[in-house]
Each structure stands twice: as C-alpha cells, then as structure tokens.
Image: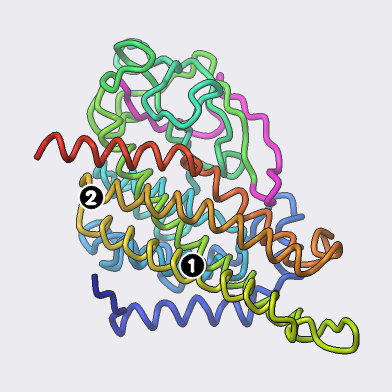
Amino acid sequence: MPFALTDEQKLLQESVDRFVERDYDFETRTKLAESEAGWGASNWATFAELGWLGVPFSEEQGGYGGGPVEAGLIMEGLGKGLAVEPYLWTVVLGGGLLARAGRTDLLEKVIGGGLQLATGFAEPKARYALNDVSTKSEKSGDGWTLSGHKAVVFNAPSADQLIIAARTSGGQTDRDGITLFLVPAGADGLDLRSYVTMDDSRAAEVTLSGVAVDAGSVLGDVGNGLALLEPAIDGAAATLCCEAAGVMQTLVSQTQEYIKTRKQFGVPLSAFQVLQHRMAEMFIHKEQTQSMAYMAVVRAAAGDSVEAAKAASGAKAYAGEKGRLVGQEAIQMHGGMGMTHEMPVSSFFKRITMIDTLFGDVDHHLDRFADLSAAGRQAA
C-alpha cells in the first residue's frame, strides 16, 4: 500500500521535530517529569498555539481538518523526545471520545488547551477486556449514581473531567449495557490515589462511591458505550505505535552514536561486525514498526471498521515485541551504565516497555488479530 506524506503533513512533522530538537532536550524533559504535575503547562500552551491540539479534529468540530494520521505524526515526533505531556490521553483518546459523541462544546476547550481529560476504562480484574465492567451506574432521578473502581487511569491527577465506563445494565462481561459518563474532578465521592509510573507518567487508582452526575454527563447513547470506546481505543493504539516508532528511532540513533565513540581494544565498538549486525536489526525493527503504525493510522482515518481494528492490533503486537527488543539491545550495547538514571537510553527503554502494556500487550493483540481474522472469514 503506497504511503506518502502530503506537503501539509510534512510541515507538521517538521514542526514537531524542530520543537523537540530545540526546546525539549533530555535535561528539560527530566525536570518536567520530576515536577509536581509531571508535565509542562507552558509546553501545552505552545501545543495549543501551534494547533497541535486541534489537528486530529474536523473543521466542523472546531479543529484543523486532520485525523489519526496527523495525530500519529505528532505522537511520533513527541516520542523522539520522550515528551511527558498527556497528548495521548487528553487529545487522542479523550478528545476522540468527545468527537465521536458529538460534544463539540467540550472539544473546543480541549483544542484551546483549557481542558485536561482522563479515561477510566480498565478495572483491576478485567485485564484488557473492555467489556469486563463491574463499575455500576444506577438511575437517580434525572441523573445517575456511579460506584466502582477504575485502575491505572493515566492523567487522572491533572484531569478536569474523567470519562468513566460504567455498567447501566446486563452482566459484568456483556457487551451491551456499558455507558460512558463525564465526571468532573473533585466530584463528591470521587477519590484518586495518584502515583508515578515507571516511565514517569502520572496515573491514579480511581474509586467512585456514590458519585452523582446529571443526565448531560452521558456520552453517546445509554448502554452503547462500547461502540464509542472500542474504535477510540483502536485509534489511540495506532497513534501509540507511531510514538513507539519515534522512541525506537532515538534508541537506535543514541546507540549508534555511542558505539562510534566508545572504544575497546583501541578501536570503536562500531568496528565489531557482530555489533554492526545487531544495529542493522534494530534499524529494521524500527522501520517495520513505523510502516505498520502508518498503516494502522491510515486504516483508522478511513473509518471505524474491522480492518482498522486488525491494523491496530497487528501494529501494536509488532511494536510491543520489537520495541522491547530494540530497547534491550540498546541497553546491552551501552553496558551497565545504560541502566543508570543519568543515561537517556534508560528512560527511553522504560517508555518502550510501558508502551507494550498500554491498551493490551503482545499476546492480547495477537489473539485479537486472530479472532478478528477468523470472524472475517466466517462472515465472508
């Protein structure tokens, strides 16, 4: 399948790369990661000013007419700098859900940089099954009352609104009966236990104890939340694979530079043929990850479909497996110092390892790809 960037996409890609190169060195990134919020508010304002927060959304929604491909290019560039700003959670996933639900009023605030989002879709015993929801929502007058527990809700400590998947009917694993609710941060009965993950992201365990929300808090149709959530997760997974390609690019370039300057037995490490072969394999894995990620965002841009879901799972499985391999090779070629906090390669390795687990690990997506393929053959 031919893939070539348009002139506008090239300019977008170049602008992100230029920002990372000029304004987002590793020292700057480390300071942001160690700050109280864990990311830079001034950078977020810059993202809004440059239009990056509105790039994935149509002009009718208040955006700039882009889509998953453009979001993927931004994520790839941010991955090269290991950016800690919550673009994935607020713009791609949270904004994607708002766009699908037609909430342009809130989407405008996201695009302007004034609204942070987090999505609580995972539960402690559900593994990666989006339909396994025990958090309940009961009708209460004109509104609803939510009770339950959401696990590892990224960006929840900074979120102004949380999107919560709760069951309004059916059994715990039924596909029908799941509804998405907007819950304001600070709502009575909403408790967050915040923490820092191994890749310096911010997340929280979210407990809802009789949280009351009004009828306008429902996203989409009552009982049909999975129809919004699944394609939004697939789109987010596709763009995450683009970030993985960016992270792998930096791992490859940093390792290549290191073995050119590090000497053993009086010669650079790059002179050893076995390391040349390993570097070549790292480069190939990065290139293939990028190709599959681009395929996934192109499929996502074409619309929500089985093909888009398959492309997202295929890319995610490959990025998860090969990303960790590239990270491990980078650490090994740097030697023991590669694991120290002072070496950038260690932080990039942590991020690529975390990417493997987000939205489903390798095994999950291999199984899902097989299931989707089998279902397609039966339908044919």
State the image coordinates of residue 275 (x, y, percent, origin top left).
70, 75
What residue is at 33 percent from the left and 37 percent from the top? Answer: 229
Amino acid type of the residue that numbered disc 1 sits on in the rendered structure: Glu
In the image shown, does 180 or 238 lie closer to the viewer? 238
Quarter location, residue 239: bottom left
Q: Quadrant of the C terminus?
A: top left
Residue 358 within the segment the image draws in magenta: no
State the image coordinates of residue 2 (x, y, percent, origin top left).
24, 75
Q: Give the mark, 1 or 2, whose residue is nearer the N terminus.
A: 1
21 over 141 or under it: above or below: below
Q: Element under label 1?
A: helix
Quarter location, residue 221: top left
List the single residue furthest toward the front.
Answer: 273
Residue 183 within the segment the image draws in magenta: yes
What residue is at 83 percent from the left and 82 percent from the top? Answer: 262
Disc 2 residue crowd, few under 14, some 14–19, many 20+, Cα 10 Å: some
Quarter location, residue 230: top left
In the image shown, does 120 or 210 lie closer to the viewer? 120
Question: Relative to residue 261, is residue 239 drawn left or right?
Answer: left
Instruction: Determine which residue is flagged by label 2.
Output: 307
Question: Relative to residue 160, is residue 327 drawn left or right?
Answer: right
In the image shown, does 278 or 354 lie closer to the viewer? 278
In the image shown, does 23 or 341 lie closer to the viewer? 341
207 over 159 or under it: above or below: above
Q: Which residues are magenta?
A: 178-201
Instruction: Point out which mark residue 76 bears.
Output: 1
Q: Element under label 2?
A: helix
Whether residues under marks 1 and 2 lie with C-beta atoms below 8 angstroms apart, the answer is no
What residue is at 43 percent from the left and 35 percent from the top? Answer: 163
Disc 1 residue crowd, few under 14, some 14–19, many 20+, Cα 10 Å: many
